[in-house]
Image (cartoon, helix red, strand yellow):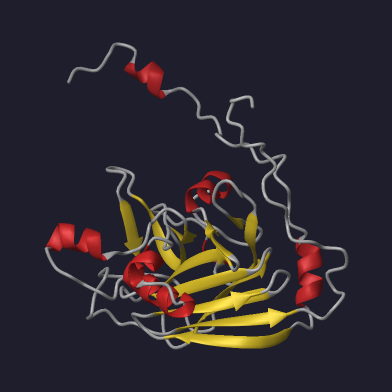
Amino acid sequence: MNQPVDADERRAKAPVICYPVDTLPRPDLALYARARNGAVKVSEVVVPPREAGCFHVKAGSFFRISSIDGPQVGDLNLWNASDLSERFYSGKTRALHGTHLSTGARMWSSFPYLRPMATVTQDTLSWYGMDEYGGSVHDVIGTRCDPYTGNLLNSDNYHHCCHSNLTRALAQETGLPLKDAEAHVHDVLNVFMCTGFTRDTGQYFMKASPVRPGDYIEFFAEIDLLGALSACPGGDCSSQHSSDVAACYPLMVEVFDPVAGTLGSWQPPAVNQYDRTHGIEG
């Protein structure tokens, strides 16, 4: 197709940030750091390779996801512990913080709540930055490996992809029927995964994660949370996705409670204050 005569002029238009964040409420990282100092470990979950596990975190506590035996990525879902309809909203988180999360970024909840669920307080892979391919770690651009796309592309039925892992784990944790639990599984934070978009075709890519045993990402729970983490069947995602042959390793989730009083007057954030009339006057 022929280009219009002003094609170069159109392409040259400067980009505009969709959501300027100058007025976005900022987490008090210094307060969180003081609360984390002396916090006591209260629980631990080891997620086996190609499986998922659930965990609970009280508002005002911390949780850490660690690589323990080998390079491994994980898919993280979060819900309000008392209301599964409030869940992590990866798309809005991406719009506010960018394609990849690190220290100071927050995981925001779905409409109509739209409030911080968790804040990244520590990240041992923050040094990675953005590489020459446009790749970085902890993305909110991928969805999660799932059996439906696998069936679409390969005509197979693979049951240990992250979507299925998360569905089984949530059903087991809550007692929900499998079909009902699946409806609550949502787009993830791809913990430790190194991803980006190709510059020529704009395709989502993955590459070998830089994570090594001992690396971790830690969060402050802004509200009472139910979490589910899948140890992805792609391992470090250096070669294959949804695979029974990729080298896979467990992941560990630890929960830490701060000493009473160290958070001062901190309170969980209120739900979004939009009046929800949507332009219809009652």
Q: Quadrant of residue 5?
A: top left
Count of numbered circles in the view: 0
Is 235 placed left or right of 210 in the picture? Answer: left
Q: Is residue 2 above or below residue 155?
A: above
Position of 46 with respect to 123 (left or right) is left
Q: Position of residue 174 (x, y in %)?
A: 48, 75
On the question of residue 236 being in view, the answer is no
Q: Is residue 210 left or right of residue 63?
A: left
Instruction: Using the rendered image of the protein, determine whether residue 214 is visible from the camera's viewpoint.
Output: yes
Residue at far left of view: 155
Taking the spot 59% from the left edge, 25% from the top edge, the residue there is: 279
Q: Where is residue 71 shown, x and y percent of the image?
A: 41, 79
The x, y position of residue 104, in whole percent, is 66, 58
Quarter containing the C terminus: top right
Residue in view at x 55 percent, y 47 percent:
111
Quick one: which residue is furthest to the top in this view?
5
Observer-nearest of 64 and 2: 64
Q: Nearer the viewer, residue 141 or 162?
A: 162
Please identify the quarter of the rendering in which residue 122 is found: bottom right
Q: Quadrant of the N terminus?
A: top left
- Vertical arrangement, residue 109 with respect to residue 224, above or below: above
Residue nearest the viewer, comparing 172 with 15: 172
Residue at horizontal 70%, vertical 44%?
Answer: 24
Q: Quadrant of residue 205?
A: bottom left
Quick one: 17 or 251, which is closer to the camera? 251
With respect to residue 42, does 8 lie above or below?
Answer: above
Q: Kindly identify the residue that appears in the image at 58 percent across and 72 percent down.
A: 124
